[in-house]
Amino acid sequence: ERDKVKFTVHTKTSLTDFQKTDFSVVRQHEEFIWLHDALEENEIYGGFIIPPAPPRPDFDASREKLQKLGEGEGTMTKEEFAKMKAELEAEYLATFKKTVAMHELFLQRLALHPVFRTDRNFHVFLEYDKELSVRGKNKKERFAGLLTTLGKSADDLLLSSTQKDVDEFFEHERTFLVEYHTHIKDATNKSDKMTRHHKNLADSYIKISSCLTEMATVESSELEKFLPKASDIFEKARKVESRVATDEDLKLSDTLRYYMRDTSAAKDLLYRRLRCLANYESANRALERARNKNKEVQSAESLQQEACEKYENISKQAKQELTDFKAR
């Protein structure tokens, strides 16, 4: 459909949890986001790195360029129009390929994880052969989500500056991830800049090649053999630059962007653990005050024990997750 991107998810499995060993369903991007959010909101998975959600499919830019090209067809030669059209179609195809790859990678990460693969919502996503009736978030919900994200960022910043971590392993991991994320972000920006330069150069070669071809039809016989050959050279150079730009975008820039999102997910795990540590220490102080006043001691002990268990569990899980993260 023109306004909707649909993905066919084909699953083959030997796990007995599924009703069949080979099945397919059709899913939309919003349903991938629903699955990611369901995992992220489940406290059971607080000690795990939630695989980053795939980015929203964006074909609007390519469609808009094709539309503008059609409108400007009368202002360029047939050869120039054909080359520009082929260039934009290749760009559209590249966008399609990376969109499919990012959504596929998200599901593969879940399927390979020993805990996420047993998640009930994941099974529903893979097996339920009808639409999940998941809608995209409206403006109010997106604004609320933005406020929540800002609140978490502010809380993380506050905890990082005021909460001393009692475990050197996690302190080292936090320092590593912050520095690693900064370098990955810088590399992504530089890769995007280089990709744009290659694309711009390819577009310039199209215009030069077309001009040389046109000149060959009106110039003297001395140049009519040279100009087509020169045009062919620029056309070959255009194809090389276009291929380099596409490969750089798909194989380098998108990979770096994925590492950025994955690193952010690991940083979120460290934030959740640090929040549990702060809650545990707060519960310890509350228990001490209750004992000093000899009031509501049992309730304070219960809350302290619960906070202790949460902190110990998330620390144990997080240590293994972060070790696996660096090994990927």
Image (cartoon, rainbow, N blue to C red):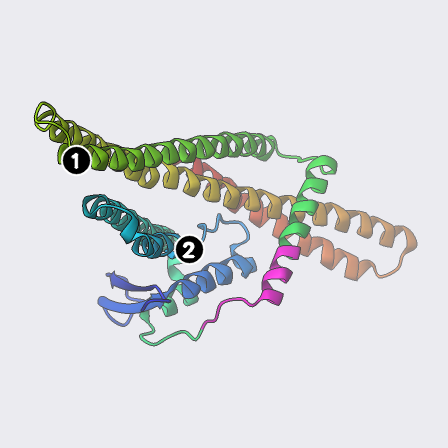
Mark 2: which amino acid?
Answer: Val
Q: Which residue is mark 1?
A: 213
Name the spot of residue 302 as percent of width and height, x first. 72, 59
Q: Residue at x 44, y 35 (%)?
A: 188
* Badge 1 or badge 2: first in the primary sequence: 2
Give the structural element (helix, strand or loop) at label 1: helix
Q: Is residue 58 above or below residue 273?
A: below
Name the spot of residue 308 as percent of width and height, x first. 66, 50
Q: Which residue is mark 2?
A: 115
Q: CA distance from mark 1 to mark 2?
A: 61 Å
Q: Quadrant of the N terminus?
A: bottom left
Magenta stretch: residue 145 in it?
yes
Name the spot of residue 167 as percent of width and height, x first. 62, 34
Q: Residue at x 37, y 75 (%)?
A: 131
Give the structural element (helix, strand or loop) at label 2: loop
Predominant SS of the magenta segment: helix
Whether residue 162 is visible to the viewer of this picture, yes or no, is yes
